Image (cartoon, grey):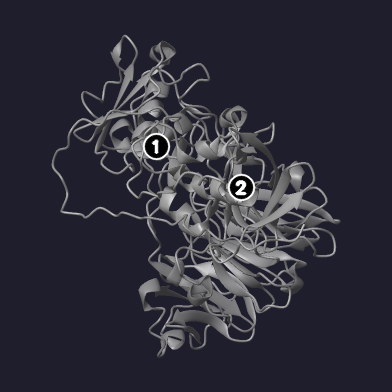
Amino acid sequence: MRPRRGYAGPRGIPTGAEAPRHRRRPLPILWGVLGVLVAVGACSGLPTSSPVQSGRSVNEQVAPEVRIVVPPPAAGASPEQIVRGFLRAGAAFQESTDSGQPVANAYLAPGSVGRWRPTSSVTVFDRSRTVAVEALTGDKVRASVAVVATVDDAGHYREVAPGTLAQVDLGLVRVSGEWRVELPADGFGLWLNTDDFGRVFDPHRVHYPTVGGRHLVPDVRWFAGGPRLGTALARAQLGPVPDYLAGAVETGFPADVTLAVDAVSVDAGIATVVLTPPASAMDLAHRRAIWAQLVATLLRVPGVQGVVVEVQGAGRLVVPEVTGPLRSATDVGYGADPLPLPRSALLRLGERLTSVEIARLDDLDGLGTAPTATAPVIPSASAAGGPAPAPNPPATGADLPTIPAAYGQFAVSADGADLVAVAPGGAEAARWHDRERASVPVLTSFVRPSYDALDRLWFAGSDGGVARVLTVNARAPADPAVPVVAPWLADRAIVALAVSRDGSRVGVVTSAPGGSDMRLDIAGVVRDSLGRPTALAAPYRQADPLSRITDVVWIDDTTLAALGAVGDGEALRPWIVQLGQGIGLRRIGIADPATNLIPVAAGARYLVSTSGPRGIVIVAQPGGVLVRVGGSWRGVEGATEIAVAP
């Protein structure tokens, strides 16, 4: 049994003096002389000090460490060359010319310079694909390209389905006898190939505490690197909670608190954030949250080793625990680390269960036939004569219960005292608490249940064709089920549901009636004052390239695995889903993602996570429990199923 962490508590950031607890005919694209010059600096160890680095405004153009140099427009360039040159020059939006402006501005008509907002939207396309430029009537052209992903103005990255096309109509006007681009009235962002995107942007975490708790939940976003990165991250941290986490997390920053100086300065590794005066009026709990959120987010900026939060005109934002730069969120009672990884799992050998160390799962010889302590068979749902007599509670790692052959897809609670399984086809679920039968909600069909580390057992499925999600107290076998409201599940069928180990989010696979339009969504878990889940926040769609998904499981706080396929005729395989980053189909450099795919396992039914991405285990029929060994899957002798506690 592993110790629990207090991820939930009374609703809202606590007030008072409470002490803290520890992203026409197409013409092929030719860049020609518009080459890329990449300069990479050498590393020479970790500096112990550094000169003052003045923070810069988010809108200021500065040079990142990796430079992309693009020449200005050539005299007499054709409309097509000007359009291509502008799109290419977007990759160097942080580079300034001798005039102090990015080179892309030189391709624009004067009235369009203000319409170009590089980070308002980013369209990412595969480096191996070409941009098509089609001449339209009236000095207009249409550019189009096959899209890999998009990034919105908040930095959220979304990988899109194969075949998605982006297009934009651009005007052309003469300026001093030369063609220049006229942008749409609603503005334009960036079109970057995946090489350039990887050079300019990186994923970063913005943090929010769970409502009433001290656990920081990360939201992954993409920002351009360079000296203004800290400022961009601080501005993002001061913004509102993302829709998909609304109600599940909160923020210490009220709407009227902004950056007093639109820059984060870095001096000798210490980042200083200066807030507007309303920050001083916040209560102690909110001030602690402000410190915790900023330090957890900014410490990931290269070169930042500590954070100071100040209020304009008032000095340091006061909290008792902070007398200098803050170097860890734990110093003000918050934590951003995920739960420790489990060390053991339960293997099912027929109707018996045996506990096994996860590190031994690839030690296949005789593992499934290892000696195990058994307990009397638990009566099945159809057994007559009332509930089974109360046995002694199972001891840790021994005296394990058995599961009747009629039930599968079993799951186990964190303390091992509660166990649940589902009948074939999902028509029935059965639950046992300390080896006695316990109540389950009434549904007409069940998907595989799951537990979170906050002692809630999650059921999902349908009730008369209506999607339903419910939870029960894993420590109280007689407590009634609590419905979890999610209006966006209307007219959808739940295929799989997995709750994150910290209980802050769920991954939900759904389909339209008839099994079409399969999708994976992430949603925050809204809880009441007793910590019971009551609602799911708005959905945040992930893994769009997958056209089929049959199962999902959390690996860590920002990583999931989905059992799915891109093409309708392809075999199911596990895919690593990086929250806010995609499933790995985005090309980087010359790497072909096909060389890194997890191998297909015949008959795969569902996934179990035992550690990192290589710790994914497949339960197959036939085949039983399959563990990954090199580039293939091998069965654990005698084992038919596996479960890992949260």
Name the spot of residue 369 as percent of width and height, x first. 45, 88
Q: Is residue 391 above or below residue 605?
A: above
Secondary structure found at label 1 = loop
Q: Residue furthest bottom?
A: 365
Name the spot of residue 455 as percent of width and height, x first. 53, 49
Name the spot of residue 99 as percent of width and height, x first. 40, 31
Q: Is residue 376 visible?
A: no
Disc 2 + disc 1, Cβ < 8 Å: no
Q: State which mark lies toward you, 2 or 1.
A: 2
Q: Amino acid at mark 1?
A: Ser
Q: Is residue 582 above or below residue 121?
A: below
Residue 478 is left or right of residue 273, and the answer is right
* Residue holding disc 1: 96
Q: Is residue 324 visible?
A: yes
Structural distance between the alpha carbons of marks 2 and 1: 20 Å
Q: Amino acid at mark 2?
A: Val
Residue 581 is left or right of residue 423, and the answer is left
Which one is nearer the viewer's eye here, 644 or 230? 230
Which one is nearer the viewer's eye here, 61 or 437? 61
Name the spot of residue 244 as percent of width and height, x first. 61, 41
Earlier along the polypeptide chain: callout 2 or callout 1? 2
* Residue holding disc 2: 83
Q: Residue furthest left?
A: 48
